[in-house]
Image (cartoon, rainbow, N blue to C red):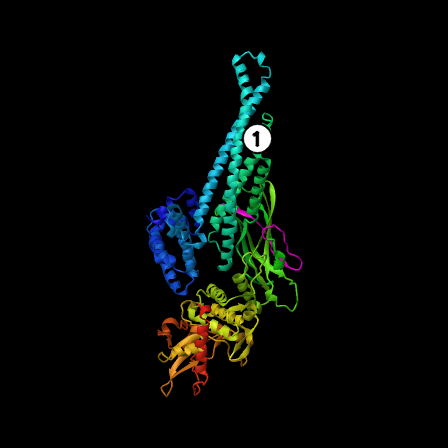
Amino acid sequence: MSLWNQVQNLHPDAFRVVQSLYNCNFPIEVRAFMEDWIEASIHTSANFFTDPTDYPNGEIIESLMGNFISTFTSKVEIMVNKDCQTKFKGVLETLIERYKVNPLAIFKFLRHCISVERCLVGHFSGNAAFISDDLGWANVGDIVKQFTLLAESAERSQQNFHTMDAKMQQIHIFRVFQEIDSNPDEIEMPELVNEHDRVQIDIPMMAQNILSSYALFHQNITTTITYLDFLCEKVLNDKLNQWKCQQQGADWGSFNEGLDTIQLWCEDLGSVILNFRKQMRSIESFVQNIRIYRTQTTLCCEEWQSNWNKLDRMFSSLVKRSLVVEVQPPQVIIKGSQKFSVLLRSLIGSRPQCILDTLPQSDVSASIVPEEETKGTQHQGTDLRSTKECVLKNDLSKLIYNEESQRSVAYFPNLYVEKITRKGNKNEERTKHKFCIMFNATVIVDGKGYDICTPSLPVVVTVHGNQGAAAWGTIVWDDSFRFGNRGAYDVQENAPWCSVALAMNNLFARETGRPLTARNLNYLAIKFFSMFPECYDGVVEWTMLFKHQLTLNGKSQAFTFWEWFYATLKLTKDHFTSSWKQGLIEGFISKVSAEELLRSCGDNTFFLRFTESMEPRKAPNQLWKGSISIIWVQTDRNGQKVVNSLQPFNAALLENRPLSFWIRATQEARILYPNIPVESVFPLNAPPPGNGYVQHSLIIRARLADLTEVTHKDQQIQMYRLWEINLAPYIF
């Protein structure tokens, strides 16, 4: 039986979770429509276990998603139902646009959905192999089971409530009958006399029955609170916190994986708690009325009040944590000139008729505050507003309920920082100061007002572009090395090199579309630890990465290791992202290693590598940090292999002409390592002249001096190998 057939046979509560996985951009109908392809290409295929963050898998996944779109297109074209065809064509257009930008995102979405489906099927069928697929959602079956038990408990309480309500209605009717017929001796109809006598006997007995039903209700609500406590812990402290951590490590912007499912659970919890509170109020009035007929009543007042307080605390925590920042602000913001947008979402906002009184029209305000003022405010509803020292403009919005998406959202389209004042020593580096966009709202639920306060991810505010590298360094370190339950944005002062390298790799992959290779990471490790040979344990301090100046051939440079790395990243992102994604640029490789590899190749074979610096001449310092060079091999007149490097190209040169132009203009660069003809991967793409002029071209001719072997080169090679061995535990 296919996975989709098993999913359709799941318990209704489990199937609701499956429905929440899909959205308007990828409806569940498309999941059913593409059942055969998903079954063959993802569920039962090794592709399911493919790691999308591993570079060699990138091309496989891109090809797989291309096949998915082409298959989807072919099936849509032959559909008979024109309404469904029109709907699916709209979905197809969205997928194609998404595929052009980030094909891995489609794969990650499908893999997440299939993983949750497998976990649910595995839990309810007992197939343990399915349950272990996704560690983040492996316990989804347990949560669904607890929600099922919660629903059953709520149903029992509802039945007890209806029983007590019906009996109370009978008592009220009988009392009215007694008041109307207060003198039964004068009643002409004898049967009413008998009814009067029966009422006198049954009311005390009925009151006792109501008290018995009350005892069952009280016992059941105690059990229900146990389920609620477990589910609040799993949904709010486990799943929601997990989502927030994943959001901080994901692509900057929107991250929605699993949020719809969390919203479904939050609304279920809110509905159950509100319904129980309503029942408890009604039953409390029942019991007070029963005292008239049964003076000896034991109401367990202390336990009743304790249960009420527990429900109130759980509901308060649910409401205060229900507002999340779905689309985060950029984490590096330029003061004054940069406008940005933020989207907030209420996780209890799709059922306003049964949960919320005023949430869909609640005002939401935004403010920017220093990180030290945010400590302890995340879940306490503390109202933090912008002050005259920190001013955020266009800072008001409303929570608006959208019928189509069934979400209550608040959108801030044009936020910008008008003024910022940093506390502390004026000589302290400004880019170390972190701020937070704090969002405040007051909502009324069940007649009670709640102050909600939710923070954004940490942001760094700069005043000019030259601060970008240092600002991003602060953000990357914060994203990667924050404490698990930090009060504000407290971070570790040091971290293992393997974790630092992973953070740098993730940043490079996010910004350029391709992660670093093992050889790249090995080179970075060698380069870094050659500066700090005392770090035998592989632990990197923050200051080593961001404060100590880089050394090259024993000379201190005018920039740090991080500034050099970030400048290289920016050069790649701005000028040759496509070539980097295709794996045409080796990039992070030492000159010695490149020379070793090239000496075994034929003439005119070349590498593209990032350089540590460029010759000063008249170039300003900021251009030294990010540059790329062509290094190639030739046979000299003596028949010896000689490796040469071309003067590096910096951002200024690449602004005028692309990298492919400079490569094709270098006549010595003809074969890209190991054996790729240059014209097949770096085409000229020059537009034909259309104005009657003959097109000109530029050719680079390298002027080579009479090179001799450097006497200390063998020592460098030996040192390189020594570092490679010593750093093995810390190198990917």
Q: Which residues are magenta?
A: 378-403
- Name the amino acid, label 1: Phe
Q: Locate the C terminus by quadrant.
A: bottom left
At horizontal 55% and vertical 17% (from top left) the residue drawn is 196
**Quarter occupied by residue 710:** bottom left
Q: How many marks?
A: 1
Q: Tell me if residue 1 can be seen.
A: yes
Q: Against 435, is 81 above or below?
A: above
Q: Nearer the viewer, residue 648 or 551?
A: 551
**Quarter occupied by residue 342:** bottom right
Majority SS type along the magenta span: loop
**Quarter occupied by residue 601:** bottom left
Q: Against 16, is 192 above or below?
A: above
Q: Secondary structure at mark 1?
A: helix
Tell me the residue that label 1 is attached to. Answer: 286
Q: Look at the image and say whether residue 71 sits in the magenta stretch.
A: no
Disc 1 crowd, CA 10 A, few/some/many (<14, 14-19, 20+): some
Q: Tell me if residue 85 can be seen.
A: no
Q: Nearer the viewer, residue 305 or 155?
A: 305
x, y percentage for residue 424?
66, 64
Q: Nearer the viewer, residue 537 or 2?
A: 537
x, y percentage for residue 667?
39, 80
Q: Against 662, is 94 above or below?
A: above
x, y percentage for residue 517?
42, 68
Q: Residue furthest right?
A: 388
x, y percentage for residue 162?
50, 31
**Is 369 left or right of 480, judged from the image as shown?**
right
At horizontal 48% and vertical 36% (from top left) the residue drawn is 155
